[in-house]
Image (spheres, helix red, strand yellow):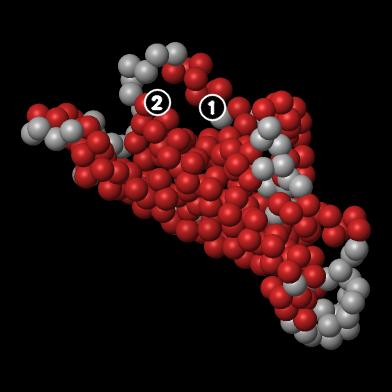
């Protein structure tokens, strides 16, 4: 934020107060998120400040205990499956919605992004009641499909933003040159919108990896994900291992979100018209 050389003292004071307020707001939002980080290195067996000592024993427990390792494996399996499905379905949906001739577009878009608006517990209850009738409850396939529903809107939004700067005349040119639609998509459209697709995939994985409500309704004891294992541990046995798991999960989520933002920025730059 730059001030004009002719800015008055009042303008500078208002800018300083605005920056101070923004800084305090960021501290208020961010500090609670990072509280588990120092607790995860606590050498004691309880959540205490100051720390009883510095140790990595809780990371060793999370990464070395079968219960935690199974939960991490389940999260990666479910997250990867949901990401693949959400990326494919979301990309195809965004391509279809980007066509101005798509019928009932203004009604379809709110329907597609409704999982972002409807409370997750409502989605979880409805999904469980539906899955119980068709035999998908307590299955990996059912959880992956449910997470695909939650993650797909992020892919639709990010890929749709990439397609806003895509020139559809390029696809017409490929058709004129004799290329099949699939060939034109793979060799022309996909490379141009790939940053948006990868960004949507990163958001989809984070959405699935961090989700706990739907899994709590659909998973059995052998299908617990890392967030569900942490939630169960908070109710049954308080242990600093939960803070170590939270730190690992938070680190992965932050890394993926940074990658997603970088890819989204690259996508916007690629889609910006050249001057």
Quadrant location of the C terminus?
Answer: top left
Relative vertical location of residue 266 with respect to residue 190 in this rendering, above or below: below
Residue 37 visible here: no
Task: Report whether 265 appears left or right of 215.
Answer: left
Relative vertical location of residue 103 with respect to residue 206 in this rendering, above or below: above
Q: Residues within 10 Å of mark 2 (few under 14, many from 20)?
A: many
x, y (%) of residue 173? 13, 32
Foreground of the two, 46 or 227: 227
In the image, which disc is placed on residue 112? 1
In the image, which disc is placed on residue 155? none
Q: How crowded is mark 1: few (under 14 residues within 10 Å), some or many (20 or more)?
A: some
x, y (%) of residue 75? 64, 55
Residue 137 visible here: yes
The residue shown at (83%, 71%) is 240
Foreground of the two, 186 or 11: 186
x, y (%) of residue 246? 73, 63
The residue shown at (66%, 62%) is 72
Task: Report whether 23 appears left or right of 109.
Answer: right
The answer to which of marks 2 and 1 sits earlier in the sequence is 2
The residue shown at (63%, 61%) is 73
The residue shown at (37%, 40%) is 162
Q: What element carries label 2?
A: helix
Using the rendered view, name the quadrant where residue 29 is placed. bottom right
User: Which residue matches tag 2?
Assistant: 97
Badges 2 and 1: C-beta atoms under 8 Å apart? yes
x, y (%) of residue 151? 56, 40
């Amino acid at each position: 934020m730059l001030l004009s050389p002719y800015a008055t003292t009042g303008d500078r004071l208002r800018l300083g107060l605005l920056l101070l307020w923004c800084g305090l707001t960021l501290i208020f939002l961010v500090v609670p998120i990072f509280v588990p980080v120092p607790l995860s290195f606590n050498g004691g067996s309880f959540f205490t400040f100051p720390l009883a000592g510095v140790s990595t024993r809780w990371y060793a427990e999370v990464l070395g205990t079968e219960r935690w390792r199974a939960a991490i494996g389940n999260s990666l399996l479910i997250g990867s499956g949901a990401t693949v499905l959400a990326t494919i379905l979301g990309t195809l949906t965004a391509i279809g919605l980007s066509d101005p001739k798509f019928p009932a577009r203004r009604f379809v878009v709110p329907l597609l992004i409704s999982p972002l608006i409807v409370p997750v517990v409502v989605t979880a209850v409805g999904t469980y009641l539906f899955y119980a009738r068709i035999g998908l409850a307590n299955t990996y396939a059912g959880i992956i499909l449910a997470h695909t529903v939650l993650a797909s809107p992020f892919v639709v939004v990010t890929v749709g933003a990439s397609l806003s700067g895509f020139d559809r005349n390029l696809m017409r040119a490929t058709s004129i040159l004799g290329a099949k639609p699939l060939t034109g998509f793979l060799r022309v459209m996909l490379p141009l919108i790939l940053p948006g697709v990868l960004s949507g995939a990163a958001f989809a994985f984070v959405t699935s990896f961090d989700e706990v409500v739907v899994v709590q309704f659909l998973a059995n004891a052998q299908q617990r994900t890392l967030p569900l294992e942490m939630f169960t541990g908070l109710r049954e046995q308080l242990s600093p291992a939960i803070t170590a798991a939270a730190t690992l999960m938070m680190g992965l989520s932050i890394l993926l979100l940074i990658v997603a933002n970088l890819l989204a920025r690259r996508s916007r730059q690629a889609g910006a018209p050249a001057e």
